[in-house]
Image: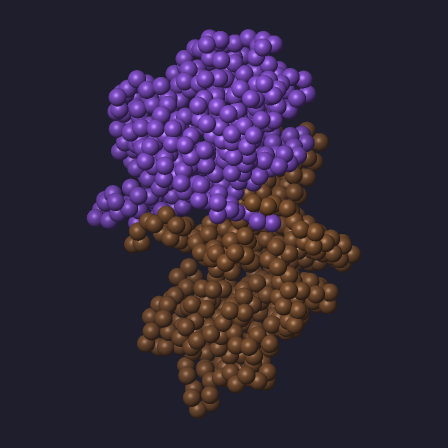
Chain colours: A brown, B purple
Amino acid sequence: MDLTWSESEEAFREEARSWLEDNVPRPALPSGDTREGFAAHLEWERRLHEARWSVVSWPEEYGGRGASLWEWLIFEEEYYRAGAPQRVTQNGIFLLAPTLFEFGTQAQQDHYLPRMAAAVDLWCQGWSEPNAGSDLAAVRSRAVRDDRAGGWVLSGQKTWTTRGAFCNYLFGLFRSDPESERHKGLTYFLVPLDSDGVTVRGFGRLDGDEGFAEVFLDEVFVPDDDGTPETMLRGGVLGEVHGGWGVAMATTSSERGLTLRSPGRFQATAQRLVELARERSRDGALTDLMADAVVDAWIDAEAYAQYTLADVTGIVEGRSPGARSSYNKLFWSELDVRLHEVALDLLGPDAELAGPWMTGYQFALSGPIYAGTNEIQRNIVAERVLGLPRR
Amino acid sequence: MRFALSDDQLELCSAVRRLLEDTCTPDAVRAAWADAALAGGGPGGGDGTVPAAWGALAEMGVFGVCVPEAHGGLGMTDEDLVPLLLEVGRAALPEPVSSTAGVAANLLARWAPPALADKWLPRVAAGEVRVGVGFPPEGGGAPTVAQAAACDALLLFDRGEVHLVEPTAVELEPLRAVDGSQHLARVRWAPTPETLVAGGEQGAAATGEAFDRAALGAAAMLVGLSRRMLDMAAQYATERQQFGVPIGSFQAVKHQLADASLAVEFAEPLVLRAANSVAHRDPSASVHVSMAKAKAADAANGAARTSLQVHGAIGYTVEYDLHLYMKRAWSLAARFGDAAFHRRRVRAAVLEV
């Protein structure tokens, strides 16, 4: 074990920290899950991109810095410590991009990745459907082959599409083989939301923001990829036709595991919780029971950070996280809820007031639901780690 | 940055695990109990030792891991030893491995006067002596020591002084405890100039380090015990059929086990990080140890509770092996500071209130 950072990593941290100090907007931007907030966040994304902080771990030719995973971790830590804005581009850069790197053609990578890094193309996820949630393999939206026109015709309904109303592209799963069932015969499509036949309806999440959308597709044409930018603007297939499940699962492990959930996010929340507890203590209102809960949650944020260091070590050395990503998702999502619950307890009667902790709490409550519900994750842990029988 | 054990460390772990699988079977643990009826079998009359396991660990050099090479040891650190203690926990070896190879080896190497170090360290390294440790309870009084009667020396701590005392020079009052293999005794003793290992500022530092190592060793063993109990429960849930199917196919069973294993999964890195911090005398080492011990104790108590529930009535008997591990977990969760104690230490450092 070597739990120290190298000189160049420390220098990278210093550079990130000082840039963030100079550039993080004050006061904080309005929520990026509202229309005006989204626009403000886009400006922020473009500023990040200009300074090459938007996708630090990507190759330089796509707008990144070729940063190592360790540097990525450092950047994220500094990003959350600085209280910088939420990343409204995250579904693209953290979910679709790893899949593009793994399954995209060279032409697709060259076309989509720089536009994504620059927040020109804004991606949302089209997986869930009204009758396909945890049971994702039940998707019914279909893709019908049109040989004459040279492409696919997509129809169906996607839902719970985060920031769908503000994005201009969707990546999603469609049933391309009408005879197929379950995991087979699905294809992973990239679809511009301004295509003919697409209707997007935004609606309010638990916190009232218009952060959700349903996306209706009525005979939307997506052309075969001929490798030209003009065609790719109109979407295409990512990976093998009928091989979409495998492609999607690669994205899932990104979503459940490391890429979205930097420990910095929870350590920053834990630190704010500690400050709140100190404040309560100065008011003489911190009971031992509350202090114990604060400390326990703070320790868990530390445990998550250590676990992530072990995860990144494994990835750097070529070991696949496998079912560890389910442990990871269970832990951070429950931790995030608990950090906020404890804070609301500390606030006492003020907990009901609209404020960052109540807002954060409502957001945290989505964690155990999205990216594969925690019930699904527990099944994965039980079956794939503990070896319990499937039914 | 590299948060993982080295290949050599992993190899040593597997070797120790295999060795203990052979020499520290559930029957061997039972034989360490004094009372066969309470142990659920075995010959009875045990004294807490498992000589075959101790001898095999000695032969492998485990007791010399933290002893300097000049004294016949391997000159390695807590980072090498702590993963082995996890295996000691997994096997529920009742022997004072942690207090001898961890606490005593490090303390004597760093703080003992040369003559004392020369006398004891080679014997520690060779596994020729067992050393127990006893810290005065919060609020004062006589310390409680596991396997005190079987030990060749006791490291005792008194108001910032460290003493090495031979068991013949103290009065042992045997205590009944939930884990009959631990042979706890209250040790009544009086410090003398002859028994002094370290006093003054050095004594205080040595006491702090020793307590951290004792708590860290317990935390590592708790992680190993938790993994053992959950392995047993998962195995049982796979074999046991009710309603025509293995009970492990029910989500109510799966989810309990997943949650219990989640807590263990996240306690383990805290233990490894604390081992690294203690080895490098990181200024935050005590806080790191406390985080590890608090979470390992909670995880082990949870693993015990869940494993028992999954086993149902068969787990609620002394003839079945589970109780051997469960009782050790309760015992180590309470020893060298329970979870509440260690959270208070973290609180003082983090909240500063």
Residue farthest right in this picture: A22
The answer to whether A146 is drawn above or below residue B220 in the figure is: below
Residue B267 position within the rendered picture, expressed as x and y whole percent measured from the top left: 50, 40
For residue A335, say whether it is visible. yes
Residue at 37% from the left image edge and 47% from the top image edge: A386
Viewer-proximal residue among A176 and B75: B75
Q: Quadrant of residue A343?
A: top right
Residue B90 position within the rendered picture, expressed as x and y whole percent measured from the top left: 39, 36
Residue at 47% from the left image edge and 89% from the top image edge: A149
Residue farthest bottom in this picture: A148
The answer to whether B80 is drawn above or below residue A33 in the figure is: above
Q: Quadrant of residue B140?
A: top right
Residue at 58% from the left image edge and 80% from the top image edge: A233
Residue A116 position within the rendered picture, expressed as x and y whole percent measured from the top left: 62, 71
For residue A45, say whether it is visible. no
Viewer-proximal residue among B47 and B153: B153
Q: Quadrant of the N terminus of chain A?
A: top right
Viewer-proximal residue among A110 and B157: B157
Specify whether B265 is left or right of B162: left
How many numbered marks appear?
0
Q: Quadrant of residue B204?
A: top right
Q: Quadrant of the C terminus of chain A?
A: bottom left
Residue farthest left in this picture: B244
Specify whether A183 is left or right of A226: left
Viewer-proximal residue among B142 and A116: B142
The answer to whether A384 is drawn above or below residue B70 in the figure is: below
Residue at 64% from the left image edge and 17% from the top image edge: B199
Residue A371 position within the rendered picture, expressed as x and y whole percent measured from the top left: 49, 58
The answer to whether B30 is drawn above or below residue B224 in the figure is: above
